[in-house]
Amino acid sequence: MSATSPQPSAEPACPAPQNRAEPPADARPAGLGAAVWAALGIVYVVWGSTYLAIRVVVETMPPLLSGALRFAAAAVLLLAGIAVRKGVRALRVTWRQFGSAALVGVLLLAGGNGGVVLAERTVPSGLAALLVASVPLWVVLLRRAFGGRTDGTTLAGVLVGLVGLAVLTGPGLTGDVELSGLLLVVGAAVVWALGSVLAGRLPMPADPFVASAYEMLAGAAGALALSFVRGEPGRFEPGAVSGASWAGLGYLVLFGSIVAFTSYAWLLQRAPLPLVATYAYVNPVVAVLLGWLFLSESLTWPILLGGGIVVGGVFLVARNQR
């Protein structure tokens, strides 16, 4: 899941501001421009491809340890970039803001992304992406649990999406995939949604890039701690890791956690939120196609049907939410 994101994605991304004001109709540009569509294409393809990259990484690398390495490297690169561009003073935040970013980072990256990485040892990447696509549904339910109001259309979208999840996790419907792996992905999606909801309620650093860097540092620390609990560092042999896994890890650091996140954060300031939100139901489609094309993952009718229902439910929710 991708630095700090409402998605649930394999990628963390900055949560969309809850109080972002829409510009008046007459102030909006007549066209969005090529840069907006290019950035949106990057978010579509790169975040959709991270599930494939994760699947390749965990073939020969301990899952949680790989996540710790990924987010630690991405955080260092992002912090260095901010310091060079804006100065070291830009990295200053209050202890309260740092604590909030750390909590959100642990939930999103150690809990949410960590669960997906663990599950992808046995769950096909495309199927994992379809299950993670349910994050917006859990976000709606958690916001309601925190006292938020939800209209009938949004609840209908949530119900549709949950029916799709039932199809995807139904015993025997997804082939030989173990139910425990499927439930682990669903649990990771719920944890990711919780982190996303809290990110809109806690005092976070004002700069989304600074917030994301600290979240990735905390997420890396959390993933490393969990990897020690599982005994991964003691079994880790760098020489036994394949070149494909190292390449996949590098791709996740540079493209999944830096390039795509930067594009996403830029889009939040340049494009309408409903358009940016479309990544939530485009990413799983991209992931399914890439898994089928490069890893020969099967596309059974329950996966196609359940995935279509989940994406349809997410579409209803995203279409009705600002």
Image (spheres, rainbow, N blue to C red):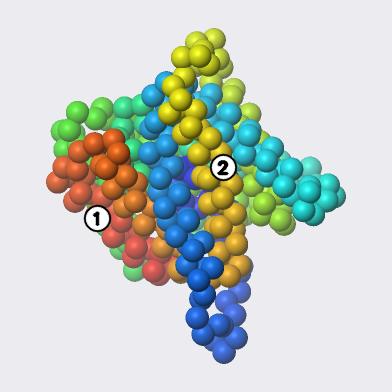
Residue depicted at 53% across the width and 24% down the height: 65
Q: Residues within 10 Å of mark 2 (few under 14, many from 20)?
A: some
Q: Residues within 10 Å of mark 1 (few under 14, many from 20)?
A: many
Residue depicted at 26% across the width and 27% down the height: 178
The vertical placement of 119 against 285, above or below, is above
Depth check, front residue: 157 or 235: 235
Residue type, mark 1 in image: Ile
Residue depicted at 59% across the width and 35% down the height: 71
Q: Position of residue 211 (x, y in %)?
A: 68, 48
Q: Is residue 204 left or right of residue 31?
A: right
Depth check, front residue: 52 or 197: 52
Residue depicted at 56% across the width and 64% down the height: 267
- Residue picked out by circle 2: 254
What distance separates the C-alpha of mark 1 from that of mark 2? 32 Å
Q: Position of residue 97 (x, y in %)?
A: 73, 47
Residue type, mark 2 in image: Leu
User: Label 2 near label 1: C-beta < 8 Å?
Assistant: no
- Residue picked out by circle 1: 309
Q: Is residue 288 left or right of residue 87?
A: left
Dot 2: element: helix
